[in-house]
Every structure is written in structure tokens, then in C-alpha cells.
Image (tube, grey):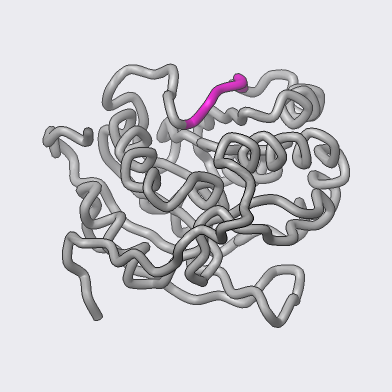
Amino acid sequence: MDTGSSIRRVSATPTNAPPVADRLRRTLEAYDAAAMAYQERWRSARPLDAVRAFAGRAGRGARVLDVAAGPGVDLRLLRDAGLSVVAGDLSLESMRIARTLFPKGALARWDFRRLPFADATFAGLWAPAALQHVPRAQTRRVLAEWRRVQASGPVFLSMREGAGDLEEVDDPPAGTVYATTVSADELRALLLDAGYREVEVEARPDPLDRPAVTWLYATGVLPPGDSRSAR
């Protein structure tokens, strides 16, 4: 497989697609409207083996970032695995619900394209189904921003398999949202280019048993003392 630094452009945006800003706004509005239902639907369909592996690599007590936590669907799992979790999301309603469920949690609302943290703050990065919500041309830059705030430790990232560039997908119970989909080679190259090592990408069936949906689970490790610029 190709693990080089170039990322192949595999899909053009449909000519009738709304502007990027509108697609991002509609996606955010969908998650705001369905935040409680989303928490209830997805909290029992989480990647438990990935949580265990991530926590094992990070080490007990490690401070990790849940970069797009939604309504806190993974917060309890990460915390119960022995991690110190800082979690946030752009969805206002998702953050309201997360704060209700986890009143003592380190929670904040943020735009993950511009994180409010100093360089090298965290010892792990947890990002399931997060990077998919940016256009393909911005994935490298957004991942670099996440990498900027990570000092060392593991990364977990998942995206849908495909070739779409912020195209319509169904994300129940939120309904239609916009997502970028990638190949395993693209996802592997993104993580390697960002400075991660021991990168592995695995295809997984959809947790909601939708036969047309395949997820790619990507893991890697940021070596301690890797001070190269992430920008």
C-alpha cells in the first residue's frame, strides 16, 4: 500500500452542492437538534476495544483530549479506563447535555479547527468521526492543529470509507449531515505526515449494522520529544 506523503484527490465536490460554509452550518444544526437522542442512540455502540487499547498506550492518569466529544458519548468510557479527559465540541446543545451528565468533567465548547490550548498539552488524542466533518482540502491542516496540542502518546481517529468531499451522509438520529470519506491509504498517509508512528488502519463494520457503511479505525503513536512543527 502507498504510505507516502501525497494524498490522492479522489472525488470532486458535486456541482450542485451547497457552499462549504452552508454544509458545515447544516451539520452543526443537525447535531444541535438531535443531541440528546444522539447520546442515547450511540452510547451503547462505542468502540470499546479501541478505548482499551488507547488507554493502555496512554497510561493510567494520562491527560488526553476528546476533540469532538458530542454529548459526551465516550467521556465515561475514557474516564473509567483511567484517563484524565478534557472534552469539547462546537455543538452548543451537545455541550449542554454533556455538562448535565458530567457536571465535574473538564468540558468546554470550541471549534476544533482552532483549539484553545498551548502546544504539547496532551498525552493522547481521541477523535472518532471528527475529521470527517471538514472538507478534504482542510483535513491535513486540521489534523496538524490537533497534533500541535499533543506532546506524545496515542491517537485514535475514525472516518467513513469512501471518496466523498463533504457530501451528504445519514448519521442517525441526527439525519443528514455532511462528511468527507477516505480510503485506508489516505488515512494512513494523513497520520504519517502529521508525525505519528506505528500507524495502523483497520476496516470495521458499521456499529448500527448498515451494510453500505464501513468505518476506518486508525491508530498511531506520537513519539515523546518529537518537536517538529505540526503546522
The answer to whether residue 24 is above or below residue 5 is above
In depth, the one of 164 and 75 nearer the eye is 164
Q: Quadrant of residue 114?
A: top left
Whether 204 is drawn above or below 188: the answer is below
Q: Residue at x 74, y 76 (%)?
A: 210
User: Relative to residue 191, is residue 31 depicted above or below?
Assistant: above
Q: Which corner quadrant holds the N terminus?
A: bottom left
In the image, is 230 to the left or to the right of 100?
left
Relative image position of residue 227 (x, y in whole percent): 13, 33
Q: Residue furthest front?
A: 15
**Is residue 213 one of those drawn in magenta?**
no
Looking at the image, residue 189 sits to the left or right of residue 173; the answer is: left
Q: Residue at x 20, y 62 (%)?
A: 6
Q: Relative to residue 46, is residue 114 drawn left or right?
A: left
Residue drawn where x is 32% and y is 17% of the image: 118
Question: Residue 205, image x and y in percent?
Answer: 62, 77
Instruction: Give the residues in magenta.
Output: 107-112
Quadrant location, the C terminus:
top left
Q: Pinpoint residue 113: horizontal percent, then vertical percent.
A: 44, 31
